[in-house]
Amino acid sequence: MKYQIKKFKDGQVTATILDSGNLEVQLRGNSYEDLFAAASIKEAWDAENSMNKTLVSSLTILCLIGQRSDRRFNKSESFDLKVISKFINSMQFDKVKLLHPHSSISLALIDNSEKISHFEYVKKAFDSIGNPVLVSPDAGAYKVTHEIAEKLNADLVPSNKVRVDNAPQISIQGDVLGKKCLIVDDLADGGRTFKYLASELKRQGAKEVYLYVTHAQFNYGFDELKETINHVYCTNSFKDIDDDFVTQFKVI
């Protein structure tokens, strides 16, 4: 089924349905405008197909906005992922697919949701480097990275980070001497944590350190990362990046 999106000069978004059939909407989903575009498409499709109960609708969000705000961090602050999820639920899609969500909270809050695995993209990075040791950057990422390591028959080294006097202290639980390492995580905002982790891996003898993240924001560029990381692998779920330091796998 085809549709058309138009944006007016004042920022308004409107949608037009061009033919009939099941609805499949795919978008980055990393802005509120994306979500309003999806809502406009769904409203127009509902109006066109209100009498046809055999058709189904699906929404694929490749980089869910607000996914790290998966709790109320401080008293009197908004629970942003809850607000975003309520808006998505109001569209009443039959299925909502999320690429590598930050936590299971997104899946719990969004109706009819399911996870799209990032495994194939990690495998591409893994094969490109040549069988590196996988590194989970923190306890939260360990379970998912362990599952990927088992599928790839790869070694896995856990790491953990604590803050002492507002400075990160990183511990590595494994041998990386003379090895290539691939840090695997869901999202990079600035990337400074990965810089420190890579530095510690190399201090413990890692030959090369690479980084894979599904959702690549890198809001402060790559200058700091280049000090300790050899190369970055990511998808273009958040944005397109034109830099020789980065290999992107296309998802949109």
Image (cartoon, rainbow, N blue to C red):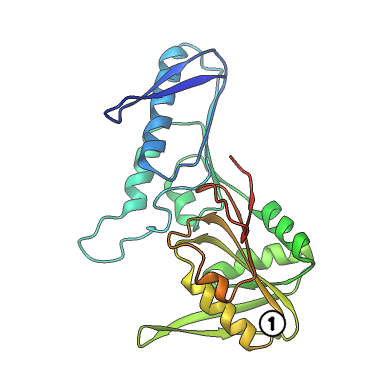
**43 horizontally vs 137: left or right:** left
Q: Position of residue 215 (x, y in %)?
A: 53, 54
Depth check: 66 or 179 in front?
179
Q: Residue at x 37, y 37 (%)?
A: 33
Depth check: 200 or 96 in front?
200
**46 horizontally vs 211: left or right:** left
Q: Residue furthest left?
A: 76
Q: Is residue 8 above or below residue 35?
A: above
Q: Say what amino acid the circle numbered 1 marks.
A: Ala
**151 horizontally vs 226: left or right:** right
Where, by quadrant of the figure, is residue 243 drawn?
Answer: bottom right
Element class at badge 1: loop
Q: Position of residue 122 (x, y in %)?
A: 68, 58
Q: Position of residue 99 (x, y in %)?
A: 56, 48
Q: Position of residue 111 (x, y in %)?
A: 45, 41
Q: Residue at x 38, y 44 (%)?
A: 85
Depth check: 198 or 162 in front?
198
Is residue 89 visible in this depiction of the protein? Answer: no
Q: Residue at x 40, y 84 (%)?
A: 167
Q: Quadrant of the C terminus?
A: top right
Where, by quadrant of the figure, is residue 114 drawn?
Answer: top right
Q: How packed is label 1: few (under 14 Cα within 10 Å), some, or many (20 or more)? A: some
Depth check: 222 or 99 in front?
222
Q: Is residue 206 above or below residue 127?
A: below
Q: Residue at x 42, y 58 (%)?
A: 68
Q: Which residue is mark 1?
A: 206
Is residue 29 visible in this depiction of the protein? Answer: yes
Q: Quadrant of the N terminus?
A: top right
